[in-house]
Amino acid sequence: MPTYVYEVIQPDGQPGEQFEVVQPISEAPLTEHPETGEPVRRVIQPVFIGGSWSDSAMHKSSNDDKKLDRLGFTKYVKSGDGVYEKRAGKGPNVITRDAPISGKDLK
């Protein structure tokens, strides 16, 4: 069952104390504090995604050309004005603005 965060609504409409409640998804949101009876509202929380999703971890993964190639990705790096060189994967070694490629060129 999910854990929901609620906050007490102060008489002036400002948010008050926050607390957590474990309840089924099918159950309606609380409208009053279970202990004090004060009016409450559910607080929307960001989704938690486990794992290494920091900028530095993602940067390390995208810089590992052998891993990208093994996973079937193609990586191009800008080497000049409108020129990109392949570092991993299938496809032409160089892509330029003057000679565009089609999807069949990447196979």
Image: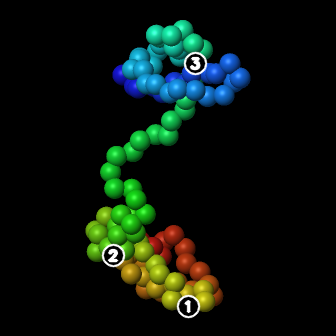
Q: Which residue is mark 2?
A: 65
Q: Amino acid at mark 2?
A: Asp
Residue 107: x and y in percent read 41, 71
Please tell me whether mark 1 or mark 3 is closer to you in this view.
3
Q: Is residue 50 above or below residue 87?
A: above
Label 3 environment density (alpha carbons within 10 Å; few <14, some 14–19, many ≥20): many
Please tell me whether mark 3 or mark 2 is closer to you in this view.
3
Label 1 SS = strand
Task: Please tell me which residue is depicted at 62% across the width and 21% down the height of the picture.
Answer: 9
Q: Which residue is mark 1?
A: 80
Q: Amino acid at mark 3?
A: Val
Q: Which residue is mark 3?
A: 40
Task: Please tell me which residue is depicted at 59% across the width and 80% down the height of the picture.
Answer: 100
Q: Marks 1 and 3: CB-CB under 8 Å?
A: no
Residue 46: x and y in percent read 50, 40
- Quote the CA–CA distance across marks 3 and 2: 51 Å
Q: Amino acid at mark 1?
A: Gly
Identify which residue, 86 or 53, lies in the foreground.
53
Residue 30: x and y in percent read 53, 14
Task: Please tell me which residue is depicted at 46% across the width and 15% down the height of the picture.
Answer: 26
Label 2 SS = helix
Label 2 environment density (alpha carbons within 10 Å; few <14, some 14–19, many ≥20): some
